[in-house]
Structure formats: C-alpha cells, structure tokens
C-alpha cells in the first residue's frame, strides 16, 4: 500500500487535495485502509490520491466529505484539481497513460492520438471543434503532441497499436498530410523497438472492436484499466470482468492482424498511394 509522504500542498491543486485528504483522514483517526473500507475501495487507492498520483474523482470526493465530515471541502478542491490541458472525458486516462507499464491501443478509423502528426491532429481538431479559435485549436493540438513524449521517456511504456486498414485510407487533412502521417507511423516503429504496430486488414471482416477506439493500460502497482472513446465522449473502465473481455477481444485482434513487418509494408504502400 502506498505510504503517506510529505507533499508541498502549494505545489499544485492536486497536491493540495492530497494533503487535505490525508489531514482530514488522520484527524478522523483513520488509516488509509479504514477509509478505503468505508468508501468501498482499497487503501492503495486512497494512497494514490494522497500522493497526488491519481486525479481526484468527483463521486469519491463526495463520499470522502460525507465520511470525514468536511462539508463540500474536498468536492470544491476536486474541481480545481481536475483542470486539464486535454478534454475532460480523456483527462483521467491521460494521467494514467503516464504511469502505465504497457499501452495497447486499437484504432478503427483514426490514428491513435499519441501517433498523430501535427498536421493530422490539426485537421482533426478543426473538424471536430468548428467554432474554436486558432488559439484553442493550437492548445488542443499542442497537448496532443506532448503525449508523444511517451516514446522518448527512458522508462516509457511498451506500446502496441492495432490500426484498422480503414484509418490508412481516410484522407484526413489532405493527401500530403496523410502521406506524412503514414510515413510517421513507419518512422516511429523503426526508431522505437518498444513500439509495435499492426494493421487489421479489411479482409478480416467483423471484429468486436470494429467501431470502438480502445486503449488497454497495465501498471506495475495497480489493476489494468481500459479507456474507450467515441465522438465527444470517452469512458474509463475499471471493472475487472469488463477489462477481461476487452483483453480477450484485443488478443483476438492481434492474432488476426498482419504481422508487424507486413503491417509496415502495407502502411508504406498506402503512403505511396497518396503521392499518386
């Protein structure tokens, strides 16, 4: 179980939340396990909040306030601590992504965000945020570009992406942008041995993930989770039975997809098609 550590409560909103949760818990004479038992979660989960390693949750903050008699104190702090550079529905997953030991993504129609080029990401953002200013678009795209640091991090996660062939054929941002995007996929896979790409070809037909973007994340010190995303919404799945179903479906996709080398060959061929 994570042990309490001294935080600078004024370092950021999340650290302030964690230090306040610890202060209130200790004032109530509870251990992390005691509070976890009453809140129907583990003491380890409480520890992650107190160490500022997990973004506070609104529903959990309400439960903590009720159990600790703190009014709406933690709920108000939670709203401050949950501010993020990325879309609110993705923010929790974005934080977990940084702690993951491995990330396995399935992309049905669009490139995984962590593999997108700036031109591709900009075209997507402008298409989905039609009323956004240039500054808002730039902030969104820059936040997405920062995620690519996962590949340059010394202790970055193992990354495996299965991309449906359809994503190679939809010309997001125009022909040049798509050519560069596909070339970027190949370059990333060649440059980073811990990044593996596979293509799920049209010939496979139906698959459980056919219309669902999914990301399976595993950790050294926490249970695995799944993040799924659609247009303007996303969901973090922590239920063990559901995670196991996603695990099984992903393994099936990996089994029927092209090999990594054959996949890179197909991506390279598709890139050349955009030159024609």
Image (cartoon, rainbow, N blue to C red):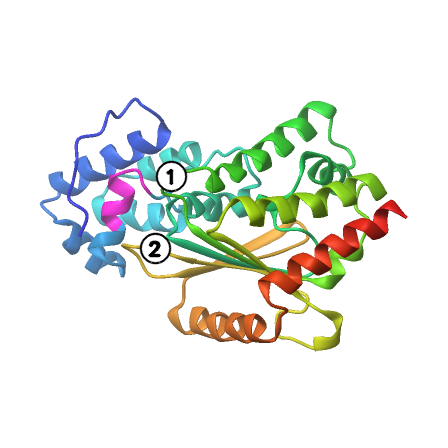
Q: Could you tell whether 216 is left or right of 138 in the image?
A: left
* Magenta stretch, residue numbers: 46-53
Residue 98 in the image: x percent, y percent? 41, 43
- Write the residue at 67% across / 38% down: 117
Residue 48 lies within the magenta run: yes
Outermost left residue: 29
Point 73% across, 63% down: residue: 165
Query: Would residue 252 be found to the left or right of residue 238 on screen?
Result: right
Q: Which residue is mark 2?
A: 219
Q: Which quadrant holds residue 126?
A: top right
Mark 2 vs mark 1, CA separation in Å: 16 Å
Dot 1: element: loop
Pick the residue in front: 78 or 5: 5
Q: Earlier in the sequence, mark 2 or mark 1?
A: 1
- Residue 83 in magenta stretch: no
Residue 169 figure quarter: bottom right
Dominant SS of magenta comes to helix
Work out which residue is located at the far right of the displayed protein and give it.
Answer: 276
Q: From this view, report whether residue 276 is shown above or below residue 138.
A: below
Q: Is residue 91 visible?
A: yes
The answer to whether the residues at label 2 and label 1 have Cβ atoms under 8 Å apart is no
Measured from the top left, where is residue 162 in percent x and y?
60, 62
Which one is closest to the eye, mark 2 or mark 1? 1
Crowd class of label 1 (few under 14; some 14 to 19; many from 20; radius 10 Å):
few
- Identify the residue at horizontal 20%, vertical 54% (top origin): 43
**Residue shown at 40% from the left, 44% from the top:** 156
Bin the neighbour count of mark 2 within 10 Å (Cα to Cα): few under 14, some 14-19, many 20 and up.
Answer: some
State the image coordinates of residue 174 (x, y, percent, origin top left). 84, 42
Whether residue 174 is visible here, answered yes or no, is no
Give left or right: position of 19 versus 219. Answer: left
Residue 28 place in picture, x, y as percent: 13, 43
Residue at numbered disc 1: 154
């Amino acid at each position: 179980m994570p042990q309490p550590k001294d935080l600078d409560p004024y370092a950021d909103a999340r650290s302030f939340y964690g230090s306040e949760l610890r202060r209130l818990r200790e004032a109530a004479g509870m251990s992390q396990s005691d509070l976890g038992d009453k809140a129907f979660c583990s003491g380890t989960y409480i520890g992650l909040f107190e160490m500022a390693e997990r973004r506070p949750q609104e529903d959990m903050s309400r439960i903590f306030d009720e159990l600790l008699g703190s009014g709406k104190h933690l709920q108000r702090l939670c709203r401050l601590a949950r501010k993020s550079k990325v879309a609110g529905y993705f923010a929790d997953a974005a934080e977990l992504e940084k702690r993951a030991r491995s990330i396995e993504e399935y992309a049905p129609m669009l490139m995984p965000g962590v593999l997108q080029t700036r031109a591709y990401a900009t075209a997507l953002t402008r298409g989905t945020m039609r009323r956004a200013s240039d500054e808002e678009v730039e902030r969104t795209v820059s936040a997405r570009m920062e995620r690519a640091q996962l590949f340059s991090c010394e202790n970055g996660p193992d990354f495996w992406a299965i991309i449906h062939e359809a994503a190679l054929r939809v010309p997001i941002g125009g022909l040049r942008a798509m050519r560069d995007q596909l070339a970027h996929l190949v370059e990333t896979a060649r440059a980073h041995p811990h990044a593996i790409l596979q293509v799920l070809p049209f010939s496979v037909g139906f698959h459980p993930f056919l219309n669902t973007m999914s990301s399976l994340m595993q950790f050294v010190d926490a249970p695995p989770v799944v993040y799924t995303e659609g247009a303007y919404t996303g969901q973090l799945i922590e239920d063990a039975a559901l995670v196991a179903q996603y695990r099984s479906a992903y393994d099936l996709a990996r089994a029927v997809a092209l090999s990594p080398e054959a996949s890179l060959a197909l991506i390279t061929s598709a890139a050349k098609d955009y030159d024609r």
